[in-house]
Image (cartoon, rainbow, N blue to C red):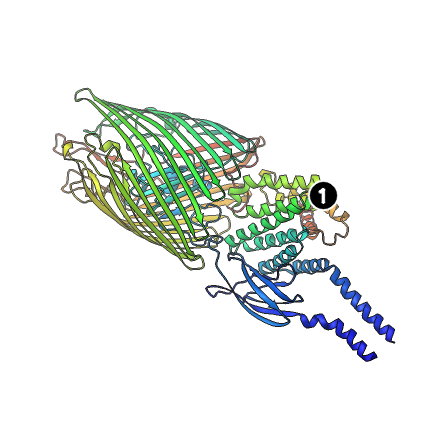
Amino acid sequence: MRTGFLFLALFGLVAPALAQTSLHGVVLSTGGDTLVGANVWLPGTYDGATSDPNGRFAFQTDTAGARMLLVTCIGYDTFRQELQLAGGLLRLELRLHENASALQEVVISAGSFEAASDRRRAVVLTPLDIALTASATADIAGAIATLPGTTRNGESGQILVRGGAAYETRTFIDGLYVQNPYNSTVPNVPARNRFSPFLFKGTQFSTGGYSAEYGQALSSALILNTEDLAPQTTTGLSLMSVGLGLAHTKRWERRSLAVSGTYTNLSPYFALVPQTIQWMDAPQSAGGELIFRQQTSEAGILKVYASFNRSWMEMQYPDPFRPQETLPLRLEADNVYTNVSYRDILNGKWILFAGGAYTFNRDQVASGFGNDQEQQSGQMRVALTRPLGEKIKVKFGTEYLQGRFNETYRDGAAGHYHTLRKERYTAGFAETDLFFSRKWVARAGLRTEYSALLGRANLAPRVSAAYVLGKNEQVAFAAGQFYQTPEYQLLRSTTDFSFEQATHYMLNYQRIRDGFTFRIEGYYKEYDHLVKTAADASQANNRGNGFARGLDVFFRDQRTFRNVDYWVSYAFLDTKRDYRDFPGAAIPVFAATHNVSVVYKQWFPKHNTAFGATFAFQSPRPYHNPNRPGFNQGRTPAYNDLSVNASYLTNLWGHFTILYVSATNIFGFKQVYGYQYGEAPDATGLFPSRTITPPAKRFLFIGLFINFGQRYRADAVTTEDI
Amino acid sequence: MKQSILLFALALDYLTLSAQSNPYQSAMEKAMVQIDSARGPADFQAAANTFARIAAAEPGQWLPPYYAAFCHLIGAFQLFQEDAPKALLTIDLAQASLDKAKALMPQESEINVMQAYVLIGRLMENPMAKGAEITPKVFAELEQAAAMNPANPRAPFLRGTYVLNMPEFYGGGAANALPYFEKAAGLFEKESDRGLLPHWGKGTNAKYLEQLQQAGKGN
């Protein structure tokens, strides 16, 4: 009895141990990969374990009966399974589904250089990258020219992509097309992009195959997304070798307002550094800018941007008949640009975008002739995006643009010409992203456009897809059709044209890991319905065509050397086209076969200085020599450039200050952009010519940027990690 | 004999019961040992998982989600070098855990400190681009933490660490960081046994303080 009781007591003590269940097992993905760090547990108890590097886990529990087993793991859907716990050993093999949205390793990459939104580690050009790229002199187009797929045309300063002319690249700000992204200028005096890189938080540069959201660009879309609320109240003063600027930003809790004014005048600089152009009135400009942001809800934001600018210059310009001689030429230009947009999430599901933009631009040229060009456009855009579950996202929208082109040409002898063209353009688009798995994404889109000016409509399908090969590497593919209304300047005598057309195909491989980026992309682009001009304007037609094919290679390393970031771009281009006044298929003057850029940046923390250097090489470009048989048969010398810059960060009387110095072509390479020939032979029977070169061998820039009462700036280096 | 055995049995039973009557306490103690012995991101993930389990079982306690956030964050810092995207997702988890703690304990100085710490984690993604946006937020959280509880040594400690890593011309550097470490050291001395309450930072603070004082003597 006694022993019996003792037994009972002891038995009572050990009884719970017999009800204990041991759970052992392994956590796998549905694809069979072992998952590390998964939390395997019985909710409501403390019992559970974390899977080890082999995906294995083991734990005991005292609970019994029907219990839910829960497994959570980063990048995977939560897993649930009902268990019967009745003591003993339970072996489990748990398979988790990849979470399509959480870890989107796969990103559509063909044709696109995307500045990172927060998560995507794609190729990035941040505002700071642009500012610190030597040779760009803080110009967006200048920095883009260091990416593969572009050709430098120093005489225009514009972005040229994959054998496309400058007009084939269009700029979009917050989804809205920008009519005049560059300053007004005359041929062979390079333009700059109107917009400061610091306006934008994201830059997406598409070298082709871009989304159906955008249209009216045969080759390329430069998609700029503006900053949200300004981070803080600040006042900035810029003192530059070319002018000065003053800006004030005020930040409230949910809104911000920035107002700025800039005046630039190149005459002091030209007085110091001799120019090949004889200036009577060096380029000057005065402008102002207003940026307003209002946060309307958790995700809602209203953005208003407005700017105006007036610029003028007067110079001795090459006579078109006797290029060695010059005639006075004056350019006066006015530009007003406004962009208003609103973005919000509706019902927690729909992302709404609504925006409008208005541009007014007038260029007045006075020389032996007078030419006034006035162009206006007003546009609206509405787009809706909605995720349907985790695997599908849809986006659709519509655009409307009303444009007006008003030109007067006066020539004392030849008379007076007037052109007025009005456009009403309507477009609709729909696109869907399909995440088949974490490895596989495809995007299919359709865009349709109607131009009242041409009286024609088009339908442009676009597809792209990306597949993850392994950790950090993927392949992508894109194809699509792209249409563009011929430029107003081609529509002076007739509007009986169809859209110019391009078809893109591209295949891309990229590997991004630990601060290294490597990508290689091959492409083929076919042009059709390009406008052919003729001496007899009535013979102009739409029967031009052409092709471009090539290979773009990009390598960027932000890791190997401490405080050093560098990238190397190489582009091979093979292109011919028959368009405008070409007698047949030929290489256009803006195309170069080999294009190399090496961009280097280093941050010296002890000296608070960032240093940058850019080397560029471009193989010879064609030019047309009328003194020899053939067309575009001449070749310029190869182009070489080494540019440097340095930014020194300091405090001046307690105010955060950046001293910025840059110089292009420090070795003074002779850079030849082409040759200009007279329109008629001279007395010797030959067409006279002149060499088109930069206005000076080098361009030096010095700027001092002071931020009153500030120690921190969004566009400033704030730690050693550059 | 019989009675003594019975008593012995009851005593054992009582001990077992007492341990079971506060399983929260013992689970937390075990989990905190897990933090102390953690070495790499995988260990911190495991510790965070443990706290997440306790948090789910004890929905009224703010410390389990607080420590889960802490473990995710430390793991994320260690992950940045090898896998930045995963580190960023881990910081999201830290923020999510911290939000749970915040909802349970809105007026807690330690939570503001942890919020500042998580923001510093966010900064790691791109210090150049995010510095201007995040730095004032970090300082605001730490100032609020110090206002709520002037005796919290982790507010000046974290501030000192941040200032130490900032360039001098922004008001950073050793000389500017030193007063914060000194202040924190005084407060750490006064901090008595905190049990399960947050008590991290003392050793690191002492290490930094010593380094800075040594460097100061050298000059």
* Res A591 quadrant in image: top left
- Disc 1: host chain: B
- A692 up-or-down from B64: above or below: above
| Image quadrant where one finds the N terminus of chain B | bottom right
Residue B61 percent across, percent down from the top left = 68, 51
| Image quadrant where one finds the C terminus of chain B | top right
Residue A77 percent across, percent down from the top left = 51, 57
Can residue A193 be spotted in the picture? yes
Q: Residue furthest top?
A: A412
* Residue picked out by circle 1: B183
* Res A47 quadrant in image: bottom right
The foreground one among A694 and A360 is A360
Can residue A670 be spotted in the picture? no
Residue A63 percent across, percent down from the top left = 66, 65
Q: Residues within 10 Å of mark 1 (few under 14, many from 20)?
A: some
Q: Amino acid at mark 1?
A: Lys
Point 16% across, 32% down: residue: A537
- A626 up-or-down from A394: above or below: above
Point 84% across, 70% down: residue: B7
The foreground one among A58 and A689 is A58
Relative to A632, A77 lies left or right: right
